[in-house]
Image: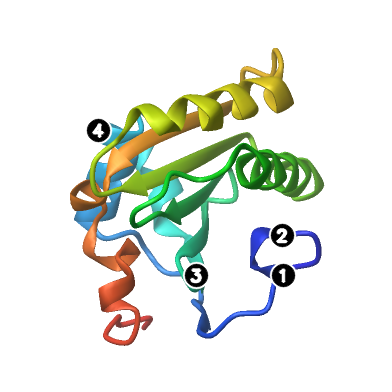
């Protein structure tokens, strides 16, 4: 994936083959992220993982980058880089939407600079969205602790 967030050196990297979304993943995308995708879109989900970052393509329509943070909120520079890569990835793959999900134990005021960086790169692109969620809201297949125990079919 040239130019993608997964291009950087990694300690762990797993690429998943396309498979149907689990009910938990569908619920996360629809309820937590607010996606109104039809059911058939969830028949094909690809998840690529690299350390604490993931790239999901759902139904060849929706691109989601998930970045998990532990203690520190992501820097504005990191968010800008991920947004630029995500938008380029979305456009080159001809996908409909890009969503950047920042998952952290507790959303903090330090995320204000990340939100500002996202807005600065996205501008008036209404097909790109930022979501800040609690790590606990991530479905099992998106949690790093399950990295080696996922059934990729």
Q: Quadrant of the N terminus?
A: bottom right
- Residue at horizontal 73 percent and vertical 48 percent from the top: 85
The residue mark sitting in front, 3 or 1, is: 1
Determine whether 44 is above or below 115 in the image.
Answer: below
Residues under numbered marks 2 and 1 in contact, where contact means CB atoms less than 8 Å apart: yes
Name the residue tied to disc 2: 4
Compared across the picture, whether 52 is left or right of 135 comes to right
SS at circle 2: loop
Cα separation, mark 3 vs mark 4, equals: 22 Å
Q: Which residue is mark 3?
A: 18
Which residue does the numbered mark 1 point to in the structure image? 7
Q: Earlier in the sequence, mark 3 or mark 1?
A: 1
**First along the sequence among labels 1 and 4:** 1
Q: Residues within 10 Å of mark 3 (few under 14, many from 20)?
A: some
User: For mark 1, does the 10 Å Cα neighbourhood hold few (<14), some (14 to 19), or many (20 or more) residues?
Assistant: few
**In terms of depth relative to the viewer, which is nearer, 75 or 48?**
75
Can you tell which quarter of the image residue 3 is in? bottom right
């Amino acid at each position: 994936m040239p130019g993608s967030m997964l291009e950087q050196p990694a300690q762990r990297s797993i690429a998943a083959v396309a498979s149907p979304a689990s009910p938990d993943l569908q619920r996360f995308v629809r309820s937590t992220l607010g996606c109104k995708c039809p059911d058939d879109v969830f028949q094909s989900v690809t998840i690529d993982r690299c350390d604490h970052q993931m790239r999901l393509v759902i139904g060849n329509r929706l691109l989601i980058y998930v970045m998990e943070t532990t203690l520190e909120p992501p820097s504005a520079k990191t968010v800008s880089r991920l947004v630029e890569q995500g938008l380029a990835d979305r456009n080159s793959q001809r996908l409909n939407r890009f969503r950047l999900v920042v998952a952290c134990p507790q959303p903090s005021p330090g995320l204000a600079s990340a939100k500002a960086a996202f807005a600065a790169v996205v501008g008036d692109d209404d097909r790109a969205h930022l979501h800040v969620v609690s790590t606990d809201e991530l479905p099992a297949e998106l949690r790093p602790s399950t990295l080696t125990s996922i059934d990729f079919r």
